[in-house]
Amino acid sequence: MLQLIVLIPLILAADVGTAIGVYGFALPWLLPVFGLVNLPFVVGAFREFRLDLPTRRNHALEHATILYLEANSGRRFSGQAERNGFRVAGHASVKDIKAAFDRVRRVVQSGEHLSYISPRCGSNIVTALGFGLGLLLLVAIGTVLFHPPLPVRAGALIAVVLLFVGLRRGIGNVIQRRWFTAVDFETVYLRNVRPARQELYERGPVHFVETLVQPKSAAPSHSALARRGTN
Ligand SMILES: [Zn+2]
């Protein structure tokens, strides 16, 4: 499934290239059909990626942990967030994962800036797909409404490709930060790291990292209690 999501922007880009060269005249008809065929997929993918707050917090922790794992080993990892933790797929030992998570925990604890935005996140791929599709539909609608001459149509398509290439990453990161992750935690703890069964889409051994997250909103009573304790 994820492989398919990865491939579709490439197919999309190839289609645009072919369309400019060969199907210039058929574009007003091809694009809406193409858009309608893909629209349910994009909507479905967005729905699938819509996350609740605990999962969004673990999604940020998953990215941050993987960024440290990758910085230490030079290897690639993938992950999947859940409500009570996250999966890490790739060649790392329990000790490596514990060390990486501990770095994340210390950064959170000290209130430093935590790096957690990943351009390779599945949410970015879905965003890029939706963005590309939206741009193509705009051109299609403009073409149907205003019947511009072929050079204008071709120019618009080139502009769409340039906009797509130039902005997809930035837009993906903004949407990832706003809707797919959350870093409103006061403290984070590691409960457990254990081997997990490898799913079809995962590469390498898989571990499940069970976390305990204390969000900021729950913090005041806790710190007030702690203060009372010390006085
Ligand atoms: Zn992600």
Image: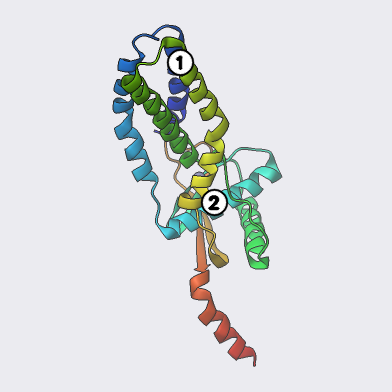
Q: Is residue 187 above or below residue 117?
A: below
Q: Nearer the viewer, residue 110 or 35?
A: 35
Seen at 33% across and 38% down, the residue is: 43
Residue at the disc numbered 2 = 62
- Please state which amino acid type lies under the numbered disc 1: Val
Residue at left offset 43%, top offset 59%:
53
Which of pointers 2 and 1 indicates the residue nearer the eye?
1
Q: Is mark 2 within 8 Å of ligand 1?
A: yes
Task: Name the amino acid, label 2.
Answer: Glu
Residue 107 visible in the picture: yes
**Image coords of residue 72 (percent x, y):** 70, 45
Q: Position of residue 105 (x, y in %)?
A: 62, 62
Per the model, the C-alpha gap separating discs 2 and 1 is 45 Å
Image quadrant assignment for residue 119: top right
Is label 2 in a helix, a strand or a loop?
helix
Residue at the spot x=53%, y=29% of the render? Answer: 163
Residue plotted at (33% across, 28% down): 38
> Mark 2 or 1 closer to N-term?
2
Residue 12 image position (x, y, % from top left): 43, 22
Image side of residue 152 versus residue 29, left or right: right
Dot 2 crowding, Cα within 10 Å, few <14, some 14–19, many 20+: many
Q: Identify residue for label 1.
A: 152
